[in-house]
Amino acid sequence: MVKRLFPIALVIALLAACQSLSAGGTPRSPYIAAVTESPIDVPQMTAAATTDPRLQPIPMHVGYGAGNSWLEIYFTDPTNPDASQETGGVDTALANVVDRARLSVDVAIYSLSLPSLRQALLRADQRGVTVRMVMESDSMDASVPRALMAADIPILGDNRQGLMHHKFLVIDRYEVCTGSMNYTISSVYYDNNNLVCIRSVQAGRDYTREFEEMFQNNLFGPDSKKDTPNPTFRMDGTQVEVYFSPDDGVADHVAEVLNDARQSIYFLAYSFTSDEFARIIMEKARQAGVKVAGVIDAEQGVTNIGSEYETFHQAGLDVHLNGLTGRMHHKVMIIDQQIVITGSYNFTNSAETRNDENLLILFNPDIAAQFMAEFQRVYAWAKP
């Protein structure tokens, strides 16, 4: 393996400190400010931006974090030689979120093996917090779910062929954590993943509605109803969009954002089999001034039936396979270095039509800068 080194701007720049609770169906208004960039380089922040007291890094022994009053973003770091449960990683931040709960913790997770989260959930239960869980049925026989059920914490399995593929939790119906990261040792310490936590009444309503649909009504996959209360809202000037699959037609929303790209599309994909997304990306790559680059998980890119990796490769796009030993488990797109797409939603037909999934679209260049820094870290190790 040849390790390609590029200058990495670890941009610690997020949003202002105040939270706006104004909801509504405001139309998309992508940022259109010009961005000066090489195919991979992230623009350097100005001295004023990097010293802005509102933009705070979150120190972590293993991994990367940054946040403000309403948002926290975390990335795992499997290249760190100290990456282990003993040192503590992104799961520590997740356990801290659970420890803040005073009324309720609702968890929808594909797989769970983190001792730190097991203990946090048990502590919440012991202090009188209502803890409920929904899981992929095939993952319920692991030791951590069994320990939670032994403590009388209710866990409902999906009991269906499609995957309950969510990776989210809701604290007090107000704080939501989601992203690509399963709550497992491998996801936190061996794989590349992201975790996004949002403190928002609107986000809390959206994810609580999705959870109740599964836990209370036993509706999964194609049986789900299109009833997301706040698919679009604003937080301190940042437009946030929340969608659930298969009921919200996620692919249409992703395609709309991709079609609006004017400068660049960067992506990190565990699994990429969507013909529609690949078609749009290749069309954009042929347009003058639109840069395209991506990294796909090495195993999925080669062995997954219908993988678009070879399509991109044959077209001469700057798309490569992950060069690290763990999974490149992100499901991320960065458009024009202004808009971020992330969540549990792989870029596949199964994610669109069969699985229970969620997806965020965040319209903010500072959030995009955080994900661009992660793109650079992963790209630097990609196979040429």
Image (cartoon, rainbow, N blue to C red):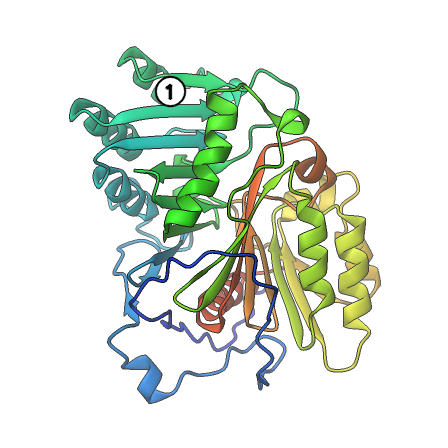
Helix, strand or loop under label 1: helix
Residue drawn at 24 percent across, 46 percent down: 87
Residue type at tag 1: Pro
Spot occupied by residue 20 in the image (x, y as percentages of width and height) = 36, 62
Residue drawn at 21 percent across, 35 percent down: 102
Q: Would residue 328 be visible to someone looking at this image?
A: no
Q: Badge 1 is on which residue?
A: 145
Q: Is residue 230 left or right of residue 350?
A: left
Q: Is residue 356 left or right of residue 262?
A: left
Q: What quarter of the picture does the C terminus occupy?
A: bottom right
- What crowding class fits label 1: few (fewer than 14 Cα within 10 Å), some (14-19), or many (20 or more)? many
Spot occupied by residue 8 in the image (x, y as percentages of width and height) = 46, 74
Residue drawn at 47 percent across, 30 percent down: 211
Task: Give the quadrant of residue 144.
Answer: top left
Q: Would residue 96 be visible to someone looking at this image?
A: yes
Q: Is residue 139 left or right of residue 176?
A: right
Residue drawn at 60 percent across, 44 percent down: 345
Residue at far left of view: 127
Spot occupied by residue 182 in the image (x, y as percentages of width and height) = 46, 37
Q: What quarter of the picture does the N terminus occupy?
A: bottom right
- Along the line of sight, which residue is nearer the eye, 160 or 180? 160
